[in-house]
Structures are given as C-alpha cells and as structure tokens.
DNA sequence: CGCTTACTTTGGTACGACCAAATATTATTT
DNA sequence: AAATAATATTTGGTCGTACCAAAGTAAGCG
C-alpha cells in the first residue's frame, strides 16, 4: 500500500471490506479470511490488515473474539445502537446521565402509546394483550416479571413497524439495565406495575390517546420516583 | 503486557486511557502523549499502543488525523451519534433505509411540537419566533433557507432541555443530508415551507397540541412526498 | 522580529520472529 | 467404524527493529 500522506493504507482495506460485507460478497456470520491471506489479497502488510480489522470490529461490522477468526456481521439498526453503547455507558454515569436517558425514554414512549391508541391494528392489540397476560402471570416471579415487563414495552416499539424503534428499545433496555438491576423488586411492586400496564392497554383499546399517554406517563414517572429514591438523586424539577 | 489468552493487551490500555479521559486526567482537546511514550508508560509494544489508539479513535474518544497526534475527546451525546453515523450511512442505502429514518424523524418531531405546544416557555417561543423570522428572510436564498430551516426544527429539539435531543437532531440532519442535498430548491418551495413553519409556530403559541402535530405532520409529509418523487421511490402505504 | 533552513520527533508501514491457542490431520483405542 | 487421543499445522496476538515522510522545533539569517 502506498504512503499517501493524508490517508492510511488501512482505510482502503477498510472500505473495500466494508463494501464486500454490505454487498454480501462476504457472507454474514461467516468467518473473515485469515490475516495472512488478506495480506496477499490486498498486498498489504499484516500491520495494515490488522488495523483494518480492528477498525471494522470497533464499528460492529466484524465481531472478533481474541484468537478467533472475526465473524462478518452485516450491520442492522441494532448494530448501530450497540456501537453507540460503549460510549453511552460512560455518559449515564455522568451528572444527570441516567435522568436524561430515562426522560428521553419517557418522551419516546408517551408518543408510542399515543400512536398505539390511534393506529394499533387488531394484531397489535392482541400482541399487547398477550404480553400483558404473561406479565400478569409473572407477578410472583420478579425475575420473570422483569422480562415480561420489558417485553410489554417492547411491543409498543413494534407498532410503528419501523425497524429503528425496536433497536431503540433494545438500547434503552440495555443501557438502563445497570440501574434497574439494583432496584429491589417485589410482588407488590410488580402488581403496581402490572396494573399500570393494564391501564395503558385499556386506554389503547379505547382508542384514547390522552388517557394512554397519561397512563404511560404516570407509570414511568412512578418508576422514576422509585429509581430516584433508591439512588438518592436530587429531586427532578421537570 | 502479558499474553492472557482471552483478552488482548490492548484492552487494558484502552480501558486505562478511557478512564483517564473520562476523569479528565487526560484533558479534553489536548493531544495524546506520543506513542513511544505510552509504550513506556504501559510497558507495552507499539503494536499494542497503536491498537488501543485505533480502538479509542473508532469509538470517538480520540480524534485522530493521520500523522497528527490524536486529540482527546471527552465524549458527549453528539459523539455517540457520530460513532453511530458510519453505520447508519450504510443503512440508509438499504431498502427503505431513508424512509425508516425519515419516518422516525417525523414521529419524533410530532411528539416534539406537541410537547412544545403544551410546555414551551416564553423564551422557547421567542427562540422559535426568531428562527422563523430568519427563515422568512431567507426565502430568496435557498442555501440560507436550508440552514434556517434546520435551525427552526433544531429549536424544537431544544425545548425538552434534554441534551440527547439536540444530538438526535444533529444525527437526522447529517444522515439525511445526502438526500436533501440532491433536492431541487426554489423560492416557491421555500415559501411553502416557511408557511408550514409558521403554521406550526402559531399552533404552539395557541397551545394547541393537536393542531401543532397536524401542522408538523402535514409539513413533513409534504416534504417526504417531494423526496419520494425526486428519488422515484414506491409510494409509501403508512 | 519574522522567515527560511537544518535537525529531531513522531506517526505510518513493512518485515520477521515467536508463542500459545485454535484447527486440521493422523494415529490409536474401543 | 465411530469415538478418542496424539500430533502437526495454521492462525491470531505481541514484540522488536527499521525506514520514511511529514510535523514540530531550534538554529541561523536577512
């Protein structure tokens, strides 16, 4: 590879591999060719190849465990959120980090339930009902309740049928999980949350956006209050 | 650095540097120490140091131009979106990529104007008025109009006072820019858009969320129709 | 004091070597 | 013949050295 002053040799390799991954020429889930072979193919030194691999890996186009062949990963919206995750995890530890993230989630979900109330299909509502039912049945099992709780909210993100949304949900879930995990859980809490979910669903079924938004709002606000107390944060004045 | 089977030596360097950046020990905007010095400090080979730098750079904690010392960048929400950008740019080129991204923006902004209508402060409304005014004055200058257009929408993202939102706006702007740039612009179009903006602001001033959302919705839907025709996409059936 | 010039530092790339873990191959056992 | 163990080979991770060209710095000059 030539020494081109203001670009690295690795860049060329990166963009070539990038293209091949996106075009499917390098099949998703299949291992990348050996470094020493890529050397020949690109007539570049191992240094350069390895740098390229590192770059692709950091951006989520390759999934590499030490000592294993990197696996080709054709990126989707989840990959994006994933790549962002490493930084977000830092940011939530900064002042107001959790709060900002959580409040953006509230904002998002308020819009989601409103949307659901006006345009959920029968199938959507069925999915919500099922999620709620599973939620109900897990009231005595906090571990399981958490899962079904997440799943219930997850259905809301699926209603607009935009693949970006479920990815965002996944983002919220994994980024806020560290906080959530430290929260004490109990069947009593679960019951409260279940009822909140039910109220939301009822409003959606009634095609009442205002009530749905209010229900969601109250639900998440209460949950936040819970977080706030647990972590002894200053009161929020929004 | 020891050879630890299932972790790379670079990882240790990365997380150490990461900590130092987040803690401010490595000052933001200042250059990273020379690679050869880091070698000593971490008693690692240059290979490892460079790999660490590459990793941090890819994730936005360092900003490195070839042949220059990497600059320390304490990440913020913009950094996150930026890191995600490289992948998003690929995704928008996939089937429905632009549409999904754009529709999520519409969704977002519908919620934003609604929020604005119910809780914008006097200062917020003032800011919107100023943005609208600038918008108006730029009707004959498509270049400038575009800027003020973005700025007007940008004010909406600032109203919730959550630093995540402006970052998202920045994301939408830069990711959708490639499409936007190819759009033909004209004073006539600009006038239409200005009026749409005015209608939105009026609704916000009137504290009418429904009307605000509808106005925004109509505005962006019309813009989408414009994009659709330009790029000859199939009609959307949402 | 500003500007050109020579010197030093530093990032980018290439090679070659070695290790240990992963993988493929062959031999051995049941 | 299938399962298993021993062996050979490949491959990723790390190190060290070397060289170049551009960036940064100091010296010298007008």
Image (cartoon, coloured by chain):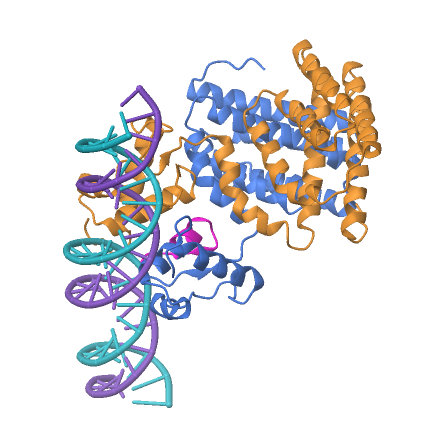
Chain colours: A blue, B orange, C purple, D cyan
Query: Residue A214 sits in which quadrant?
Result: top right
Q: Is residue A136 visible?
A: no
Name the outermost residue toward the top. B122
Q: Magenta stretch? A: A53-66
Q: Residue sitting at 63 percent across and 37 percent down?
A: B172
Q: Residue sitting at 51 percent across and 32 percent down?
A: B78
B100 vs A5, nearest the viewer: A5
Task: Tell me: A50 left or right of A184.
Answer: left
Residue B125: % across, % down: 70, 14
Q: Is residue B220 magenta?
A: no
B172 vs B141, nearest the viewer: B141
Q: Is residue A55 magenta?
A: yes
Task: Tell me: B171 left or right of B5.
Answer: right
Task: Tell me: B93 left or right of A123.
Answer: left
Quadrant where the C terminus of chain A is found in the figure = top right
Query: Residue B138 sits in which quadrant?
Result: top right
Is B24 drawn above or below residue B230 in the view shown? above
Task: Tell me: D22 left or right of C6.
Answer: right
How many numbered discs sit on the rendered protein? 0
Residue B36: % across, % down: 21, 43
Quadrant where the N terminus of chain A is found in the figure = bottom left
Residue A171: % across, % down: 53, 40
Residue B46: % across, % down: 24, 49
Is B234 drawn above or below residue D27 in the view shown? below
B48 vs A68, nearest the viewer: B48
Q: Is residue A149 visible?
A: yes
Query: Residue B213 sits in which quadrant?
Result: top right
């Amino acid at each position: 590879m030539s020494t081109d002053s203001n670009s690295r040799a690795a860049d060329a390799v990166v963009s070539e591999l990038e293209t091949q991954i996106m075009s499917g020429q390098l099949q998703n889930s299949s291992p990348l060719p050996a470094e020493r072979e890529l050397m020949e193919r690109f007539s570049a030194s191992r240094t350069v190849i390895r740098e390229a691999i590192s770059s692709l890996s950091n951006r989520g186009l390759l999934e590499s465990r030490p000592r294993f062949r990197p696996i080709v990963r054709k990126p989707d919206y989840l990959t994006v959120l994933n790549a962002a995750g490493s930084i977000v995890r830092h940011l939530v530890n900064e002042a107001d980090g959790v709060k900002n993230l959580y409040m953006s989630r509230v904002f998002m979900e308020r819009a989601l339930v409103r949307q659901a109330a006006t345009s959920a299909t029968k199938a959507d509502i069925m999915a919500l009902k099922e999620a709620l039912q599973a939620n109900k049945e897990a009231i005595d099992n906090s571990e399981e309740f958490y899962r079904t709780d997440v799943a219930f909210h997850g259905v809301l993100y699926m209603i607009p049928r935009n693949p970006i949304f479920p990815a965002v949900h996944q983002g919220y879930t994994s980024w806020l999980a560290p906080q959530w995990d430290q929260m004490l859980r109990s069947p009593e809490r679960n019951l409260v949350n279940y009822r909140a979910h039910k109220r939301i669903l009822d409003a959606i079924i009634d095609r009442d956006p205002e009530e749905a938004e209010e229900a969601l709002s109250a639900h998440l606000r209460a949950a936040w209050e819970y977080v706030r107390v647990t972590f002894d944060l200053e009161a929020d004045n929004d």
